[in-house]
Image: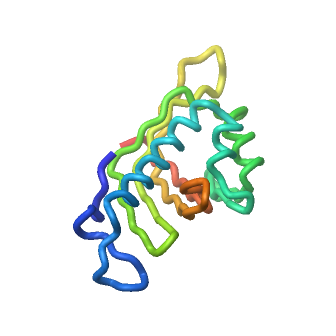
Amino acid sequence: MTTSPTSPTSPTSPTSPTSPTSPTTIEAIEQAEAAWLVALVEGEKAMTALMLDDSHVVHGPVGKIDGPETFAHFASTRRRTVFAKAEGLAVTVRGNTAITTCLQEMHIVFDENLPPFPVQEAVTRVWEETAEGWRLAHMHQAKRMPPA
């Protein structure tokens, strides 16, 4: 994963447009993003552990809005992910909030009798810094059909 357009030398916080975000903060957000990709494959409990209790996910072809438990259950049972990766990660930090965007590719099992189906999504995630680390506050997924 790469951070672009923000980098340790260019990101800013909302309180001071010229104050840089620390490389440690950017690294922690990148680690949260990587943990999310692992959680997609690991399943429901792993996903909800990274989400705030009041988080929301916008997903599906009609923009369904779900809370953490409903989304994680759907993602684990209706579209089981067996592989996930992201590219083109961009990170913007505003105080204790981080906004990330990326292209996310997942290989999903819809039917156990068929090979995994590749899906690509443009994804925006909003992370909040907590005492436990960065946690997902909001996510919006938009399918790219067919994957580019």
Front position in the image: 57 or 42: 42
- Image coordinates for residue 78, horizontal then vertical, percent: 70, 34
Where is residue 101 shown, x and y percent of the image? Answer: 42, 58
Considering every residue shown, the one lying at the far front of the view is: 131
Picture layout, residue 108 above or below residue 141: above
Whether residue 145 is visible: no
Tell me the residue at 61%/52% (across/down).
61
Q: Nearer the viewer, residue 87 or 99?
A: 99
The spot of residue 53 in percent (x, y) is 74, 58
In which quarter of the view is residue 137 placed? bottom right
Q: Is residue 9 visible?
A: yes
72 to the left or right of 123: right
Left/right placement of residue 86 relative to residue 78 reads left
Q: Nearer the viewer, residue 10 or 76?
A: 10
Residue drawn 58% across the image and 37% down it? 40
Quadrant housing residue 112: top right
Q: Quadrant of the C terminus?
A: top left
Instruction: Determine the residue positioned at 60% across, 61% down.
Output: 130
- Residue 44 pos. (x, y %): 70, 37
Colour scheme in use: rainbow
